Amino acid sequence: MKIIVCLGTGGVGKTSVSAATALSLARAGEKALVLTTDPSLRLKTALGLQSGMTEQKVPGVDGDLWAALLDVHTTLNDAVRMNAKRGEEEKILQHPIYKTIASSLSGMNELMALERISQLMSRGYQTIVVDTAPSRHVMEVLDKPLMFADLSASKKVKLVSRTYKFVEAMGLMSVGRSALEVYARAEEILGGSLVKQILDFYSLFYPVAEAYAERARKTGALLRDPSVTEFRVVTTPQKAMRDTEFFLSELAKRKFPVNMVCINRCWLRPLGEKPAGGLAGEVADWYESVSASHRAAIEVVKNEFAESVGRICVLDELPRDVDGAEALRSLETQLTSSDPT
Amino acid sequence: MAAQARVIVFCGKGGVGKSTLSVAMGLKLAQAGKRVLVVSSHPLEELAVAISLDNLAERFPEAAERLFVVYIDPVDQIRDLVETHFPLPMMARAVLNSSIFQNLIAVAPGLKEFFFLVRMQQLAERRAPERVNIPAYDDLIWDAPATGHFLSTLRAAKGFETYLTGPLSNAGAEMHRFFSAAGSMRIAAVTQPEEMAITETHELCEGLRRDFGIQPSTIILNAVSPVCLAEPEALATLDFAGSSAAMQFAIERGIAERELCDKLAVELPIRQLFVPRLAQGDGPPEESDLDLLEDLGHYLDLEQLA
């Protein structure tokens, strides 16, 4: 099994390129799946994605192409239902701290992507294309001590989680030693009720975190294995230089090669005869100026990175009336036919 | 004389140009003689415009003296608080370095947002040295995070009661007073004439209305084509059928953008401000970036925003 991770910042068409990548593999005979975070409405329709959890076979495609939606909340809720102590599921799901964890904890998207990949791995896909959340921090998940793993591994937290209920019952919250001392300090700063809430939550949540961390470690190891996982950067001409530089250096730190950089949404078609004056003239000037800046940006990236990147692929922006399914086919054709650089 | 800086917020989807417009607005105000602070929620090195700021003092010496750009990292604010609270450095370090404390900070609901807002309120109300009742900055421009995070940050101003029992209650009350004062903020919702960006503009306005009873004063449609800016009668002069494929693509793109803007105007009756897509000059990036910022400023109508 292979994993292709598509990295990119917001608004570059990463989801379309990921889906087209999976489509090209499906057309070559593989059973391929694209796991996506936030597809546009049209793409969602094209992929046949209606509801969240189960993966769906993409209709009207020649090949075994599947798509699944990554829904952070549903994935996390499922993990809670699966791993919490019996009877405590609802307490966790209704806990105010849980709501923060689910909605605003940085890296939650990536952590849940790991969870989804591990769910999907057992289902016979030859390749899973992961459309990551549009963030520059997405790779931290590969090396940053996983919050959950960290949490469940921390002896102090275990100790506190277990003793907390006892201590609470005895009304001794401010007494304790070692770990409890830190909490007491934290309380001085953050206020007692908040710290209490957090402790209360941890004591409920840690069986979930432990089970989760185990799976995340396994999936994380696969992502760190270059024989399983490859990385592609998706960008647009305007962002190409900064994004490529950034992701390449981040990946290089971890000794990962970048197999491909896709520069998407390029305006490269020649304008032909230029209309003189009027609004048509302004539109032509606008097109030419955008097109010239795209060409220049692509040139710079090619000069700079031709040697360090396996392949630099340039994709034309599609007209708007091209609908989801047709757009995917066109992108797929461009992906497979574009000259290797 | 106002006792605090006027706060202008640029918010919207990631990648629509909030940071660039924030700095362009800051430069414009500074050139007009105001003292301006641009507050970013992103580390400065990640700003698309960061490179331009290097040459700012050379190109615009007078404006540069009045224009300040800072990044507020809430984690720094928390560190400061801990260090003030525990005068003994060893004790402060022990608390800060403990993984338990770090975990507490990571999951405390709205804590980072709380610290961000407290810091912003302090900056907006900071007094000029030696001049009572004159704010240190005339304008504070908040280059806000993307919509979801922006809304959750504002919610922290409302939900500060969580902290009322703790030592943060004073700061919380000050911050709450500041952000609930009517008209303390002008909000510019930045978007682009593009499906996903506009969907997010709707979510933003809905969130602001539902949770805070406020609306943006302006929707800035950034990087639009000449078709969006054209008079309606000029549209008829475009000859689609007789054009090359590239020209057809451009016309079609322009008209689709225009339709999206018109539809948005009907669905959200909020003043629209159009900023054309401007090309960067041919010079080295740090110089042409500054030209770009200056050019963008021409389109940012002060009256409309304020």
Image (cartoon, rainbow, N blue to C red):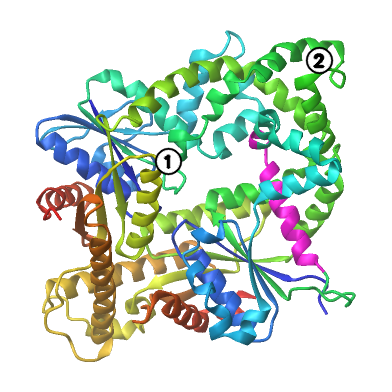
Which image quadrant is residue A84 in? Answer: top right
* Circles 2 and 1 in contact, beta carbons < 8 Å: no
Query: In the rendered image, which quarter contains the N terminus of chain B?
Result: bottom right
> Could you tell me the amino acid type at mark 2?
Glu
Which image quadrant is residue A151 in? Answer: top right
- Judge whether B281 appears above or below B248 on screen: below
Q: Which residue is mark 1?
A: A139
Residue B212: x, y in percent?
67, 53
In the displayed structure image, the side of residue B29 where residue A295 appears, left or right? left
- Judge whether B223 appears above or below A212 on screen: below
At x 78%, y 32%, the residue is A186
Q: Dot 2: what SS?
A: helix
| Residue lying furthest bottom | A277
Q: Is residue A147 visible?
A: yes
Magenta stretch: residue B118 in it?
yes
Residue B244: x, y in percent?
12, 75
> Could you tell me the amino acid type at mark 1?
Met
Instruction: For mark 2, name the chain.
Output: A
Mark 2 Cα shell of 10 Å, populated few (<14), some (14-19), many (≥20)? few
Provide the residue span drawn in magenta: B106-126
Magenta stretch: residue A132 in it?
no
Q: Is residue B158 visible?
A: no
Q: Which mark is residue B175?
A: none
Q: Dot 1: what SS?
A: loop
Q: Which mark is residue A168?
A: 2
Residue A192: x, y in percent?
82, 30
Magenta region's main secondary structure?
helix
- Residue depth check, mark 2 versus mark 1: number of the one nearer the observer: 1
> Which is nearer the N-term, disc 2 or disc 1?
1
